[in-house]
């Protein structure tokens, strides 16, 4: 009798996994129990790129990829992307709340991960401030060209071997950091940038792998002895990033003049706006918001 009950539950689970959950979704590879389609990432030297290209060739420009137990509808055609996410973007502004974010990030914050009213408020504010700083105008182009000039000068005056990857990354980081905190990276503070880059590389390298994706969906597996070290890298690198962000924000808080409406960088503008709305929902978690919109290096 017990065997029949267990067998029936197993059949019900398989029916739900292979048919019921997938019935209204675009076609895609068959998900396995617990891990979904993560097994497809194991033979890809750069997780995702070749895999998604192969899935596009097999299933067409729109398909479903299962991140563990979460179905992710993937759109790979430019015209469809423009139609759905630009022209009809209001219907696609939601973001999934991954369990790992609740555990180590204390919730979805920043433009990248927030949704609902918080996302609307922060997006509106961010666009307003960034446009003041020249987003979409020649002023922004001038900021980028200024960093390119500084990078070329650094190469010309340095007679020793140069790590061009770090040099390019620092130039991109300087454009972002100058907008956010009002200063760029040079020889005097390059160690700060390299530490930031190292922490971000550790964090995103781990979470981009199949085991990292499993940790995102099932944080509890990090308690298993075989995976505890893996999860420690994820959590320690993120805590290290937050520590750096808090330090930068606190330095700005120590010098900010709330009586003036002028601002010299995004963080100063954000903190002043946050002060005005400190009792309202949507402006909390500021140190998580500061870097979540521009960093990709």
Image (spheres, helix red, strand yellow):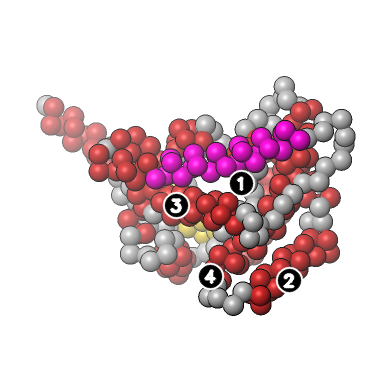
> Which mark is nearer the camera, 4 or 3?
4
SS at circle 3: helix
Mark 2 or 3, closer to the camera: 2
Q: In which quadrant is the C terminus drawn? A: bottom right
- The answer to whether one can see residue 73 in this image is no
Report which residue position mark 2 lands on.
149
Q: Callout 3 environment at 10 Å: few (<14), some (14 to 19), or many (20+)?
A: some
Tell me the residue that label 3 is attached to: 202
Q: Are marks 4 and 3 in contact (CB under 8 Å)?
A: no
Q: Residue at position x 39%, y 48% from top? A: 212
Q: Main secondary structure of the magenta part?
A: helix
Q: CA distance from mark 2 to mark 4?
A: 17 Å
Sequence-first tag of 2 and 1: 2
Q: Position of residue 166 (x, y in %)?
A: 55, 65
Sequence-wise first label, 3 or 1: 3
Residue holding disc 1: 292
Magenta residue check for 52: no
Between circles 4 and 1, the one closer to the viewer is 4
Horizontal side, residue 246 vs residue 202: left or right: right
10 Å crowding of disc 1: few (<14), some (14-19), many (20+)? some
Whole-number angstrom distance, CA of label 4 to CA of label 1: 26 Å
Distance from the alpha carbon under mark 2 to that under mark 3: 30 Å
The magenta-colored residue range is: 233-255
Label 2, secondary structure: give it. Answer: helix
The answer, for residue 158, to whether it is visible in the render is: yes
Counting residues from the N terminus, which is met first, the one under dot 2 or under dot 3?
Answer: 2
Q: Which mark, residue 163? A: 4
4 or 3: tag closer to the N-terminus = 4
């Amino acid at each position: 009798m017990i065997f029949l009950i267990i067998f029936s539950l197993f059949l019900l689970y398989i029916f739900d996994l292979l048919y019921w959950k997938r019935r209204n979704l675009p076609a895609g590879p068959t998900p396995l129990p617990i891990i979904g389609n993560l097994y497809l990432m194991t033979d890809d030297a750069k997780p995702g790129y070749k895999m998604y290209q192969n899935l596009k060739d097999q299933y067409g420009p729109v398909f479903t990829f299962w991140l563990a137990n979460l179905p992710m509808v993937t759109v790979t055609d430019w015209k469809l992307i423009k139609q759905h996410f630009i022209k009809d973007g209001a219907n696609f502004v939601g973001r999934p709340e991954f369990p790992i974010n609740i555990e180590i990030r204390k919730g979805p914050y920043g433009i990248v991960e927030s949704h609902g009213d918080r996302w609307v408020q922060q997006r509106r504010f961010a666009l307003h401030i960034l446009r003041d700083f020249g987003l979409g105008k020649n002023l922004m182009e001038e900021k980028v060209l200024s960093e390119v000039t500084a990078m070329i000068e650094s190469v010309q005056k340095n007679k020793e071997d140069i790590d061009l990857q770090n040099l390019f990354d620092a130039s991109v980081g300087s454009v972002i950091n100058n907008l956010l905190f009002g200063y760029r990276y040079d020889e005097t503070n390059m160690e700060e940038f390299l530490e930031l880059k190292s922490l971000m590389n550790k964090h995103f390298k781990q979470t981009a792998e199949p085991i990292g994706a499993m940790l995102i969906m099932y944080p509890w597996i990090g308690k298993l002895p075989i995976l505890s070290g893996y999860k420690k890298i994820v959590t320690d690198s993120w805590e290290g990033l937050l520590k750096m962000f808090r330090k930068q924000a606190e330095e700005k808080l120590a010098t900010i003049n709330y009586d003036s409406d002028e601002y010299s960088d995004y963080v100063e503008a954000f903190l002043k706006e946050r002060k005005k709305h400190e009792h309202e929902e949507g402006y909390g978690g500021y140190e998580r918001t500061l870097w979540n919109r521009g960093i990709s290096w």
